[in-house]
Image (cartoon, helix red, strand yellow):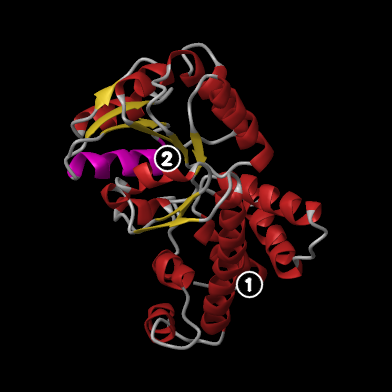
Amino acid sequence: MSKHIGVVGLGIMGSAISGNFCKSGYQVTGYDISQERCDELAGKGGNIAGSPGEVAAAADIVLTSLPSSAALDAVVSGDGGIAATGNKAAPIMECSTLPIEDKQRNHDALAAAGITMLDSPLSGTGAQAVTKDLAVYLSGDESAANMCAEIIEGFARAHYYVGEFGNGSRMKYVANHLVAIHNVAAAEALVLGMKAGLDAQTIFDVISDSAGNSRMFEIRGPMMVADNYDDATMKIEVWQKDMGIIAAFAKSLACPVPMFSTTADIYTAGMAQGRATQDTGAVCAVLGEMARLKR
């Protein structure tokens, strides 16, 4: 492959993405504040940089996958950041789920340095990222988006150009609004069936082939059946960030989202039960406890 890919942020999503680029034959350079994550990429054949700026200087295209707006600020404008030392020919695909205004601030900081940032959030879980079952929502400069579209097959199954900068995040908020609801709905249905005496695996097998099936039922159903949520592809504590962003977005538009709002307390109950680092599929255990389900 001709493109050299940079990845800043090697967490659940970034590690899967960078690993798939390596498998697809791309040269990959990555950076993370965790040495363990850096060592993991090195073990897959990737190169490790000493800063985000070094990643950008080496790469043709850079993807950032970060846990917070503060992390993005540091990656863009901090010591060794992309704005100061980046490669002006390399577009930045900002793949995190963050408030649009925070992405816009960093977009503007990079633009002042002659660097193009795209708002490019991803739809899919960490488990889906491993199998390249991701959709990419590209928004911003169209020529840069077309350039980045050429590498999508290295880490995702689909991409959509959705227009002006920020539309990628808007589309991601809509997608995650549905994820929040479908995840709790899948858990609630399984708990209902189990409380009625049905076998959990049988419920999953039958409903997966029914009109009531959903992607979340397919993806998180197996861990709900196993009642094991420790191998997290999206931790409840991280999901709280996404829930807050979507709630604030809806409020800013004066748009009621009653079903979404109802799910928030279920995820919060998971935090209260000490499930912060478990997968969001653990809402099945939360609802099971509420129903006094014995498993």
Q: Is residue 227 left or right of residue 36?
A: right
In this orientation, which residue lies closer to the viewer: 295 or 129? 129
Dot 1 and dot 2 residues touching (CB under 8 Å) = no
- Indicate the amino acid at tag 1: Arg
Q: Which mark is residue 292?
A: 1
240 left or right of 72?
A: right
Residue at (39% x, 68% y) in the render: 222
Who's the residue at 68% across and 53% down the image? 246
Please check the rendered image and state whether residue 286 is part of the magenta-colored stretch, yes or no: no
**Distance (Cα) linking label 1 and label 2:** 53 Å
* Point 32% across, 49% down: residue: 152
Res. 177 visible in picture: yes
Residue 134 appears in which quarter of the rendering?
bottom left
Residue 118 position, x and y percent, is 50, 40
- Residue in the foreground of this view, choosing between 89 and 242: 89
Task: Characterize the local packing of mark 2: few (<14), some (14-19) or many (20 or more) Cα atoms within 10 angstroms.
Answer: many
Residue 87, x across and y down, in percent:
39, 21
Can you say whether 278 is above or below 18 in the image?
A: below
Residue 91: x and y, percent?
42, 33
Asked whether 285 or 154 is in front, the reply is 154
What residue would you read off at disc 2?
Answer: 144
Q: Write the residue at 63% across / 44% down.
A: 241
- Magenta residues? 11-23
The image shows residue 149, relative to residue 286, as above or below, that is above
Q: Position of residue 73 (x, y in %)?
A: 59, 25
Taking depth in this image into account, of 170 and 263 the one nearest to the observer is 170
